[in-house]
Image: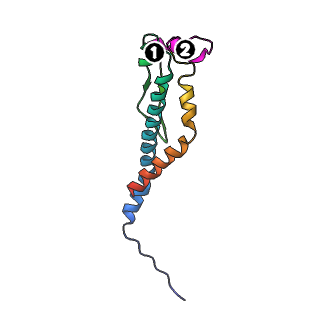
Amino acid sequence: MSGFSLEWSGLDEFVAAVRGIPSVALNAAGGSLYREGEDVMTESKELVPVDMGPLRDSGHVELPMFEPGEVSVTLGYGGAAQDYAVAQHEDQSLNHPNGGEAKFLETPLLRRADGMAERIGADIAHAIGAQQ
């Protein structure tokens, strides 16, 4: 009968690295989502209707929020002027004499949606590869 032997050195380091993948992946996803949000907001600020500027100035991207096994990034407009922001965004019949348009946040988000999963996935893969 022939025997089989396997010796693995560094098993503890391997196990630690594998256990760390979910947190590395989640952190990478958070950073990637934040960059995507910033790109959407940059384009959005070129489309937002401008009267005196407070609506455009209220545009923001929040830092990633981490929950067990998930991450999210919130972006938007309005703050205290939320009702005004919603009306400007949703009412496509409004006239914007100083430029801008309705759907000023939705339009750039939809433009970036194509390929977004791939970009985020590449960032995660890079982070996992860099960890190992």
Task: Pick the quarter of the image with the C terminus.
Answer: bottom left
Please provide the residue range marked out in magenta.
Answer: 78-98
The image position of residue 80, as x and y in percent, is 44, 12
Judge by depth and name the residue closer to the eye, 14 or 31.
31
Q: Is residue 79 above or below residue 14?
A: above
Q: Is residue 63 left or right of residue 102?
A: left
Q: Residue at x 46, y 23 (%)?
A: 45
Question: Is the Cβ of the residue at disc 2 closer than 8 Å to that at disc 1?
Answer: yes
Q: Is residue 33 left or right of residue 92?
A: left
Q: Is 74 inside the magenta-drawn segment?
A: no
- The residue furthest bottom is 1
The image position of residue 7, as x and y in percent, is 41, 75
- Whole-angstrom CA distance, mark 2 to mark 1, is 9 Å
Can residue 66 be seen here? The reply is: no
- The residue furthest right is 93
Residue denoted by label 1: 55
Q: Residue at x 59, y 17 (%)?
A: 90
Q: Is residue 90 above or below residue 72?
A: above
Q: What is the secondary structure assignment of the residue under circle 1?
A: helix
Local crowd size for mark 1, using a 10 Å CA cut-off: few (<14), some (14–19), many (≥20): many
The image position of residue 84, as x and y in percent, is 51, 11
The image position of residue 44, as x and y in percent, is 49, 25
Q: What is the secondary structure assignment of the residue under circle 2?
A: helix
Residue denoted by label 2: 88
Q: Residue at x 54, y 43 (%)?
A: 117
Q: Residue at x 43, y 37 (%)?
A: 35
